[in-house]
Amino acid sequence: MPEICQTGAPEALAGSVADLPNDFPADFIWGLATSAYQIEGATELDGRGPCIWDTFASKPGAIADGSSGAVACEHYQRLDSDLDLLQACGARAYRFSIAWPRVQPDGKGAWNEAGWAFYQRLLDGLAKRGIQAHLTLYHWDLPQALQDEGGWAARSTAQYFAAYAAQAGRRFGAQVASIATLNEPWVVATLGHESGIFAPGIKDRAIAMQVAHNLLLAHGLALQALRAQGGPALLGIVLNQAPVQPASDTLADRAKAQLEDGLLVRWYMDALFKGAYPADVLEHLGQDAPHTEAGDMALISAPLDFLGLNYYTRNLVSAQQAGAPDSSGSRRAAQYEVTDMGWEVYPQGLHTLLLRLARDWDTPPLYVTENGAAYADVLQQGRVHDVERCRYLQMHIGAMRQAMQDGADVRAYFAWSWMDNFEWAFGYSKRFGLVYVDYASQQRYLKDSAYWYRDWIMAQHQAALAA
Ligand code: GCO
């Protein structure tokens, strides 16, 4: 039995392992999450086409450590042993993404059977180990060939995405528990096309907002195609969301927070669940508001089976902080301890967020599809004593449970991330994994958080059986 991480949480951060409730619903889904570009590597193997992150990473200065996803965790080559590792981590569910350019190198036209075969092996391996599969269709790796035709700024990309989604549904729809169309459209639109710190590195707000709309349209078209197939998989989308709070009580900070909330939360929630963009944000955007066509909003707001939420920190905004949002979405100040990303540890934000979504929109069941923290882990004699990550996970699980007791319908929790991986513009310099990856040897080591989470999942399972 590994040592349980004790928390010693500061007063402000509610929850510790001692008072983590053991009373989750028996069918609550506990999982681990990754994405294709961040772990697979093998970007040139077996017919995979190039994606926008390959291109972006090759630009000097784009990635902090000059790296790319070319090698990453070599998960593509290590699939079988990695699946054993996933099982050793106690996962009952696994959230992963398909690399679109692996299965359709140009994003349209011919399918790459070797690419599909990799994901079939992954699904077979999960099934054999009794691990539920939760598939994300798009986690940021757009085929470069489509970028060359305008990328997400072009409406045609939404149609190509729907065709790819339909094909994935036909092949895998009966083998997965859920399908999420997109991961974090806000990040793709805003960080990829307004601040330009993520691929494809464009800096133009009007383009960013058109991309935000075209992504939602792509979601709507994909959903329509998948629904028409009538498969058993639950269908949804994954958003990065957070409570957006003013750093002070001044009018300026409050106005700024209201606008940021509009851009990050209400833009996506209103579109998906009310079929309209928020009026105050449209007014603020003026000329930069996206072009939409008749019927778009009806497609976008078609009913979902679940809503996935990625939560890391709150957004604390101040009118004085100008500039583009950073990778968690905030132009931030911090009042509490921060992780290695500089992100505040703020578990009560998850409670606030879950309840607010349930209150302000008619949402389907909620899945926490990502939650976790980067810390500067140290490997010593095969162990990583990541006390802070343990505490982070425990506090957020506690906050989620509290939200459930207070009325939020949450059905799943996926820790981000199963293993250390390519953290986008930060390269390999930030470690989010519950499993440590020694990139030089590609050896994997369970961190203390992985042992804790494994035991936690097992305890939930036993409690459910005993009930
Ligand atoms: C996300 C990203 C992940 C990041 C994680 C930490 O969906 O935000 O999906 O890819 O690695 O969020 O920044």
Image (cartoon, rainbow, N blue to C red):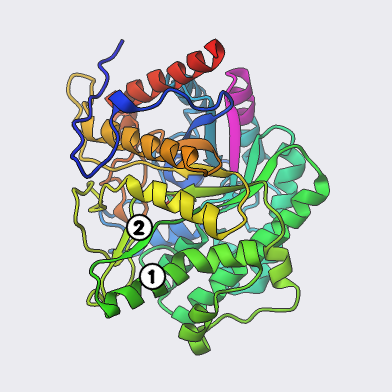
State the mark number for residue 80.
Answer: none
Residue 130 lies in magenta, yes or no? yes
Tag 2 near tag 1, CB within 8 Å = no
Who's the residue at 82% across and 51% down the image?
228
Identify which amino acid the numbered label 2 is placed on: Ser
Q: Find residue 456 and report its horizontal and vertical position in percent.
A: 40, 22
Q: Secondary structure at mark 2?
A: loop
Tell me: residue 248, above or below residue 94.
Answer: below
Residue 238 lies in magenta, yes or no? no
Q: Find residue 100 and report its horizontal and vertical position in percent.
A: 60, 51
Q: Find residue 255 and report its horizontal and vertical position in percent.
A: 35, 77
Graded by Cα atoms within 10 Å as few (under 14), some (14 to 19) or many (20 or more), the crowding at tag 1 reads: many
Of residues 268 and 228, the one drawn nearer to the viewer in this rendering: 268
Q: Earlier in the sequence, mark 2 or mark 1?
A: 1
Q: Quadrant of the N terminus?
A: top left
Q: Confirm or reject: label 2 Cβ below 8 Å from ligand 1.
A: yes
In the rendered image, which quarter is residue 370 located in? top left
Identify which amino acid the numbered label 1 is placed on: Gly
Task: Classify residue 175 as left or right of residue 20.
Answer: right
- Which residue corresponds to mark 1? 196
Closer mark to the observer between disc 2 and disc 1: 2
Q: Quadrant of the C terminus?
A: top right
- Which residue corresponds to mark 2? 328
Residues shaded magenta:
121-135
Tell me: residue 21, above or below residue 346.
Answer: above
In the rendered image, which quarter is residue 425 located in? bottom left
Of residues 467 and 74, the one drawn nearer to the viewer in this rendering: 467
Who's the residue at 56% across and 23% down the image?
26
Task: Classify residue 72 as left or right of residue 224.
Answer: left
